[in-house]
Image (cartoon, rainbow, N blue to C red):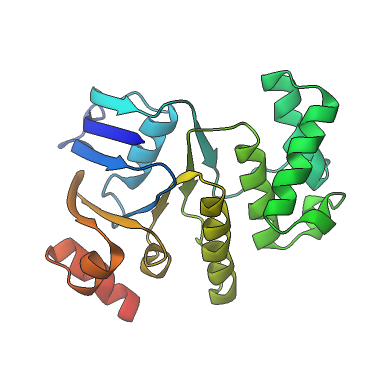
Amino acid sequence: MIRVENLRKRFPGAPAPTLDGVSFTLETGQLAAVLGSSGAGKSTLLRCIVGLERPDSGELHLGGQAGLVFQSFELFPHLTALGNCVLAQRLVSGRSRAEAEERARRLLGDLGLADKLDAYPERLSGGQRQRVAIARALAMEPAVLLYDEPTSALDQSLRREVAETLRRVGALGMTQLVVTHDVRLARASDVVMVLDQGRVVEQGPPARVLDAPQHEATRRLVAQEQG
């Protein structure tokens, strides 16, 4: 279970807090989508959870480390899919090559990349590169996996592929939190949270939050999807 309690963050010189008392709980294996317009606090929330920013106050209970899948994937171009998933295990976790490769092969296979182990990033599609990045993060056994705008700049077919990938990862029992502006992707989640001016203004199942929005910020996001 992941629990965030009354998280607050205000940057020096800012007229208002970027995060203003954010609280939520995720059960193990749930997929949560954090929606919000630019400046709502989504990226700061993600950075606080993963440890790239220190909140001013509040509590984070993750039960372990958080893994982050970067928007640009950040794969090493000189390493194969397998090599990208092995390197951090060897350098950070100290696993033997055999153990690291076994874990990487299993995870890449779980994500539908068993035939791409020896492929370099330049030979992979955008969706395949993203799945390699996810497998690399999963290999480090995080308590929660975080995604930074995973469908940004992708066409509609690749957006559907991302949603399918998140379902695959969820089937492995991983708790996932997606920071996104993509309402369609949020509909594939278990829980939707809407951030506005640093606060969670709506939270619940997608059908309730997105099909019957109560807050103006949510209604604006849904209107953009329909437009």
Figure quadrant of residue 203: bottom left
Q: How many marks?
A: 0
Against 78, residue 218 (above or below) is: below
Residue at x 37% of width, y 43% of height: 43
Residue at x 53% of width, y 75% of height: 156
In the image as oriented, which residue stretches furthest toward the right? 118
Q: Position of residue 47 (x, y in %)?
A: 40, 35
Q: Is residue 137 left or right of residue 78?
A: left
Q: Is residue 138 left or right of residue 116?
A: left
Q: Position of residue 216 (x, y in %)?
A: 13, 65
Figure quadrant of residue 218: bottom left
Residue at x 77% of width, y 33% of height: 86
Q: Is residue 153 visible?
A: no
Figure quadrant of residue 9: top left
Quadrant holding the C terminus: bottom left
In the image as oriented, which residue stretches furthest toward the bottom? 227
Against 221, residue 175 (above or below) is: above
Q: Is residue 171 visible?
A: yes
Q: Position of residue 92 (x, y in %)?
A: 67, 21
Quadrant holding the N terminus: top left
Against 78, residue 207 (above or below) is: below
Residue at x 63% of width, y 53% of height: 130
Query: Closer to the camera, 206 or 226?
Result: 206
Q: Position of residue 55 (x, y in %)?
A: 29, 25
Query: Closer to the camera, 45 or 25?
Result: 25
